[in-house]
Image: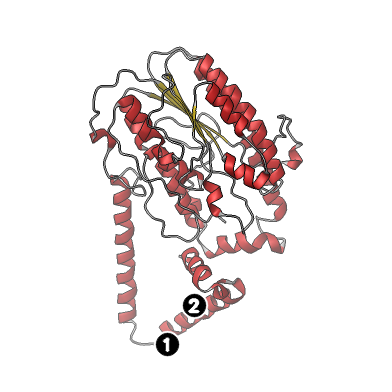
Amino acid sequence: FYGVLQDWLRHHLPLLSRYLVLLPLLSAGLFAINHFTRRTVHTAKLFLYVNSLFILLCLFEASVFLINQATNGQGLTTRKADFGDIKPMSAATTNPDIYLLIFDGYSGNHALKKEWNYDNSAIYSFLRARGFFVANHPKSNYNVTPYSIGSMLNMDYHPPFAFAKLETKDFMQGVATVSENRLCNFLTAKNYEVRNFSFFNMSYDQTRIAPFYVVNIRELIVNQTLLARFTKDRGWKNGNGALKQSVIDDEIKKENRIHYNRIGQTMSGLLNISREKREKPVFIYAHFVLPHDPYFFDSTGRAYAEKEWTVSRSDKSRYLSQLVYTNSLIKNLAESLLKDAKRERIIVIASDHGYRSFEATADPQMQFENLMAVYYPTKRYPNFYDSISSVNTFRVILKDFFNMPLPLLKDSSVYIKVW
């Protein structure tokens, strides 16, 4: 419970959350409790209270566990209705392949013009010339990847957040909403196969690239203890412990190499599946860590030296260069997916959120300005609109191609403090 206490103090009484103050207070409190329990004769009531509190806490944790088991870990997301209970207006005439391509941290054109003085309309024109619908003012619903993708695939919002800052447990709960989601439940019931080239392990198909968002149960527990928090916050600054700065840098470099390899693995895997001939429909989810940091490429696609991959995430010039290169990947993918189609296919090219490392004075809403482009084999888009947010993307698609009478939700964005 130390992590909870420290976070509460940081939010409400920041002076007391400093280790210089907090550690002596905790030590004095433990000494006082020990002294009291040793000297007093009437300890029966104290032990009764402590044991009763412990039993109540165990009952609370057991109830949370049972709720998670009953909902397959989906207690986080709202469940107004299971989409399997909603009857289509009429039988679907075709089940096209569906490609979901996510480009992480890709900002919308308005944000690029305002912050970089860069006009990105050329990629919009390219996609429209090939029959895509491209929204002019789309929004993501969250500025954190698991929550954004979770709301898109579940076609619903998460419950209101009760925390001031995203912690490991909350982050992993968001990851769980991707692992089991409404869209894949619906599609697999329609005989779809799922092919997963994302950062997430999904119950329908384990990721075919190196996973990134993996739940480490031990880490969730240990990270909240006094020793782990102190080591993380102060250990490396004092030049000792497992988290010295040199060790941190080595871990960052190792993770960056994995990120770099994920890009090539995702591209090749996606194109290989695109060329396959199959009878069953398929849903493909591919997630590229582009143009999001680490910044690997310049605008021409030339890779920087590995020692330069650890540059600050707030390096706006590197971000723009990597975005320009990302545009060339989007063009190549769009051309290939349209050319290789053996069956009718829907293609969604989107971003989970926009650039996030703006100056403190910048409008936080710019973090939600994203990319949203959709291709239908009919090239007609009666229900898409310019200001669509991610949560409504598959509500529209299921209505258009599966005749599901799903109402649109109000388009809104929820800011989550990450750091």
Q: What secondary structure is marked by label 1?
A: helix
The spot of residue 282 in percent (x, y) is 41, 22
Side of 265 where 45 appears, left or right = left
**Is residue 107 visible in the rendered structure shown here?**
no
Along the polypeptide, which appears first: circle 1 or circle 2? 2
Side of 329 where 61 appears, left or right = left
Q: Residues within 10 Å of mark 1 (few under 14, many from 20)?
A: few
Where is 229 relative to 77, above or below? below
Labels 1 and 2 touching (C-beta < 8 A): no
| Residue that numbered label 1 is attached to | 39
Residue found at x 64% / y 55%: 359
**Is residue 259 visible in the rendered structure shown here?**
yes
Give 344 or 189, whichever is nearer the viewer. 344
Amino acid beneath label 1: Arg
The spot of residue 386 in percent (x, y) is 46, 37
Give 408 or 326, whichever is nearer the viewer. 408
The spot of residue 346 in percent (x, y) is 44, 24
The spot of residue 203 in percent (x, y) is 40, 34
Q: What secondary structure is marked by label 2?
A: helix
* Numbered label tally: 2
Question: Tell me, what colour scheme is on the image?
Answer: secondary structure
Where is 354 relative to 235, above or below? above
Side of 160 where 245 appears, left or right = right
- Whole-angstrom CA distance, mark 1 to mark 2, is 14 Å
Where is 256 relative to 377, above or below? below
| Residue that numbered label 2 is attached to | 30
